[in-house]
Image: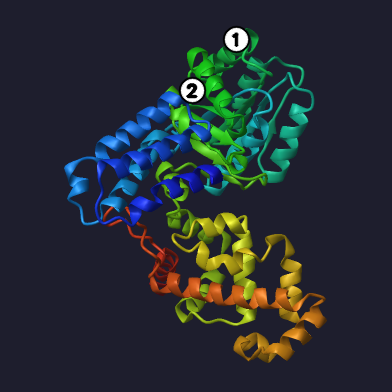
Amino acid sequence: MFDALSDKLQSALGDLRSRGTLDEEAISRAMREVRLALLEADVNLEIAREFVGHVRERALGQDVRKSLTPGQQVVKIVHDELTALMGSGSSQLAFSPRPPTTILLAGLQGSGKTTAAGKLALLLKKDDKKPALVAADLQRPAAIDQLMQLGEQVGVPVYADERSDPVKAVRDGIERAKADGRDVVILDTAGRLHVDEALMEELAAVRREAKPTNVLLVLDAMTGQEAVNVAKAFQERIDFDGVLMTKLDGDARGGAALSVKHVTGRPIKLASVGEKLDALEWFHPDRMASRILGMGDVLTLIERAEAAVGDDEKEEIERRMMKGEFSFDDFLKSYKMLRRMGPLQGVLKMIPGMGKQLEGLDQVNEKELGRVEAIILSMTPHERRVPHVIDGSRRMRIAAGSGTTVPQVNQLLEARKQMAKMMKMMGSGKMPQIPGAAAGAKPRASATRKSSSKRKKKARR
């Protein structure tokens, strides 16, 4: 996500990072590049101008000019302004003190609303909520069947009545959720191919009946500025509290995500970052700004690791991280753990300053884990425990035994070295510092270790 914008912004700010002093000409040149990068990302012209104006004004201030690292200060300013542009407030939903909390999903047909309902149910279930789904989309053929299938996959009940009107379906669904002790009700409403009067009247009637705690507008990030226009139209007729952005993983430009908060005043609260049902995340503007500027996202990385690794595995992984050098058996376990955390390339981008150092690992295609496992299993137990003994003749034997080539074996050997380096740095808490990051905002690479230590103390007590 944001790949094109990220590359261009990092290129535009690259010269400033290394400068000992800054003058107005250097800042103006960089700001021209930043403005062009935003426009190419499909950001509205006025928003791009305002953004660059804010950055320029702050960059020319005395505090930056007198700083020992003025270039990095400018990068920090860009980071702060990107965060503000996407919404610096909380991304959390509001929960009713008297359950059930009702969440109404609105949006156009094709925005991914029904799938988003299933993903949201799973996300809330993981947060120890007891969600239920209500099928209020009675317009689209098979919409109810799709929601029923999603409900079965994520393990939550779906309340539906194909014969009723949407308002009655919502009323009955909420009553059934109360009777069943569900504390969150997610309403999947009907969409249209475009914003029209019938759609708005139906949504208004459903909203009056449901009195939702949260109204989320589901927007397709791939539609760019059209998504922003849809958000403006919905805000004028059916006000909403926040945005659930779908297909953000496929949006290389990022215009919708960068513009919607500025245009509507409503923040992005959730973002779908993949096709799987567990690929829905709370949206953190500051973390997203860090990813765009190549600073990584250690907090999200740790959260994913916590979710992907069982308690029994955590202590063993912590031991490996402290050790720094581990066998190919360990490598295979760690590689499978990374796969559970999401697409490998996305995980690597969360590690600040480590992208180039992990090129060997990045080249190990996540879809070819079978090949990786075949290479490792073609090694002798001694070779797996002591990888440095693998010389040229051994590499040829391993390649023949696994049905691969010597270059592929070499690639895996290099990937293990890079993985060992990363694990050692994470274990020692010596992750690369983020250029231009806010003072005191250090990556919490040892959070997993600390949480495990707390569990040990509780167990002893």
Which element is circle 1 on?
A: helix
Determine whether, in the image, residue 215 is placed left or right of residue 407.
left
Q: Assess disc 1: are there few (<14), some (14-19) or many (≥20) residues with their C-alpha within 10 Å of its C-alpha.
A: few
Which quadrant holds residue 364?
bottom right
Quadrant of the frame with the C terminus: bottom left
Q: Position of residue 68 (x, y in %)?
A: 21, 57
Q: Amino acid at mark 1?
A: Glu
Query: Looking at the rendering, which quadrant does residue 280 occupy?
Result: top right
Apparent side of residue 116 relative to residue 430 in the rendered image (left or right) = right
Q: Which residue is mark 2?
A: 240
Residue marked by disc 1: 201
Residue beneath the point at 59% across and 39% down: 251
Quadrant containing the N terminus is top right
373 sits to left or right of 458: right
Q: Amino acid at mark 2?
A: Phe
Residue 201 image point, x, y percent: 60, 9
Total marks placed: 2
Q: Residues within 10 Å of mark 2 (few under 14, many from 20)?
A: many
State which quadrant residue 307 falls in: bottom right
The answer to whether residue 371 is visible is: yes
Q: Residue shown at 46%/50% (left/top)?
A: 291
**Secondary structure of residue under mark 2:** loop
Nearer the N terminus, badge 2 or badge 1? 1
Q: Residue 111: give x, y in percent of width and height.
A: 64, 29
Find residue 389 and report its horizontal and vertical position in percent: 63, 91
Q: Residue at x 42, y 54 (%)?
A: 295
Q: Nearer the viewer, residue 259 or 460?
A: 259
> How is this picture coloured?
rainbow
Q: Choose between 377 and 412: the one closer to the eye.
A: 412
